Image: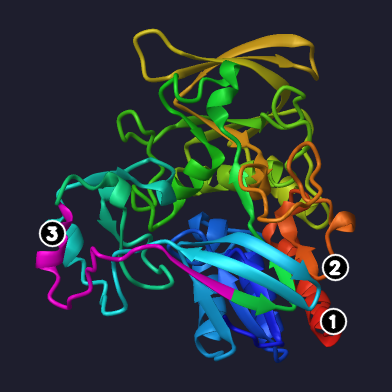
Amino acid sequence: MSTDNNKILVIGGGMSGLTAALEAAESGAQVVIVEKKPYLGGRVAQLHRYFPKLCPPACGLEIQFRRLRQNPRLTFYTQAEVIQVSGAEGNYDVTLRINPRYVNDRCTACGACAEACPAEREDAFNYGLNKTKAAYLPYDMAFPFKYVIDASACQPNCGQKCHAACAYEAIDLNMRPQTMTHNVGAIILAGGWDLYDAAKIDNLGYGQVKNVITNMQMERLAAANGPTGGQILRPSDNLPPKKVAFVQCAGSRDENHLPYCSYICCMASLKQATYLREKDPESEAHIFYIDLRTPGRYEQFMWKVRDDEGVKLIRGKVAKVEQEVGSPRVVITAENTATGNKLRDTFDMVVLAVGMVPATKTTPFAMPLSYTPEGFVIPELLPKGIYAVGSLKSPLDVTKSMQDSTGAALKSLISLSRR
């Protein structure tokens, strides 16, 4: 057990968690980051571009990773989870479980294990748009930069082929889960968000109608390190779509699914319309919306997109998404609420602006906390010394989440001062 009395635990290694951890560590605290995925970077790593500068995530993430590498007060665990918490502010005992990666620190990311691996898995990083080998590198600038073996995808004894192919003895098939305990003065919850299951929205056709994808799948199609090398191609035949519909509030603001606004969806679809238009100036983007919510300075971005002649903004609720008979194209039925007319149109691809669900909805914290019916943490009712950040409290964009994380780092440092 570690007994350092100047330690903060950060649960979640996405942009919010990294920001909170780095701010606290650079202020003198010892910080432990716990991340359930095999890499740090979270959802931001999966974006093509993010606001406000519309730059690729590699920029911001590389800065954060460099700060992390240079700071001896930071320790991180990937493929890890918190399984037990006890104590109070200034004296929390936290038990972690570290799940096996089956690849040790000798890994040079040469890729020999993946070349030899006979098993495949769906690529969760690309939201199932492609497959990788069971031995895989999560993404091209993954941190830590080493391979991982997905044991759930392995065939009996197939790991031996990966082991035999590795010249550096980096494959360790005997790894087992480990537990460890840290004593910390404060805890920051930065578990982030999950994408709502679009298959639950029966009328929008996800999983049933060809070429209906989610907004995060669109990010991966547009990204240079995505499954298509940055070319926006529809999944059914890998042809570039000329006419794409963006359906807003897919599940959000709907009492049958997510009763709240997910905050980022309007901006995400406007941004993705620019991806399409930049790749193909002859393409068309049709955005079906209830109302467009572009807070603060983002209003100017909306005006820019609105004035593009290749972008059509349609105020209307989509009632149904269907497959065109004998074709990979998609038919949308909607009501234009501005005119009162029923609209029926055909598109090459449909992108659903699916909402955000707090990670605590499916994975509650390892001690009793107060949540809203939607799974968001109620910050006012958190125990002293525990702080939630970003989208665990409400839907937020990257910038506001990072600002919130800086505030949580300061509060955690104050908690340490009370020990």
- Say whether residue 361 is magenta: no
Instruction: Describe residue 324's horizontal placement relative to residue 116 as left or right.
Output: right
- Residue 307 in view of the camera: no
Rendered position, 149 above or below 374: below
Query: In which quarter of the view is residue 333 placed?
Result: top right
Q: Position of residue 169 (x, y in %)?
A: 17, 76
Which residue is nearer to you in this view: 183 or 343? 183
- Residue position for label 1: 414
Whether label 1 touches label 3, CB < 8 Å: no
Q: Position of residue 320 (x, y in %)?
A: 60, 14
Q: Dot 1 lies on which element?
A: helix
Instruction: Describe residue 393's horizontal placement relative to residue 65 as left or right.
Output: right
| Amino acid at pointer 1 | Ile
Q: CA distance from mark 1 to mark 2?
A: 11 Å
Say how many tags the image has: 3
Q: Position of residue 157 (x, y in %)?
A: 14, 51
- Residue position for label 3: 160
Q: Residue at x 9, y 66 (%)?
A: 164
Whether label 3 touches label 2, CB < 8 Å: no
Q: Which comes before the other along the chain, label 1 or label 3?
A: 3
The span picked out in magenta is 158-181
Q: Dot 2 lies on which element?
A: loop
- Residue position for label 2: 384
Q: Dot 3 lies on which element?
A: helix
Query: In which quarter of the view is residue 72 placed?
Result: bottom right
Q: Residue at x 66, y 66 (%)?
A: 16
Q: Quadrant of the C terminus?
A: bottom right
| Amino acid at pointer 3 | Gln
Q: Which comes before the other along the chain, label 3 or label 2?
A: 3
Q: CA distance from mark 1 to mark 3?
A: 50 Å
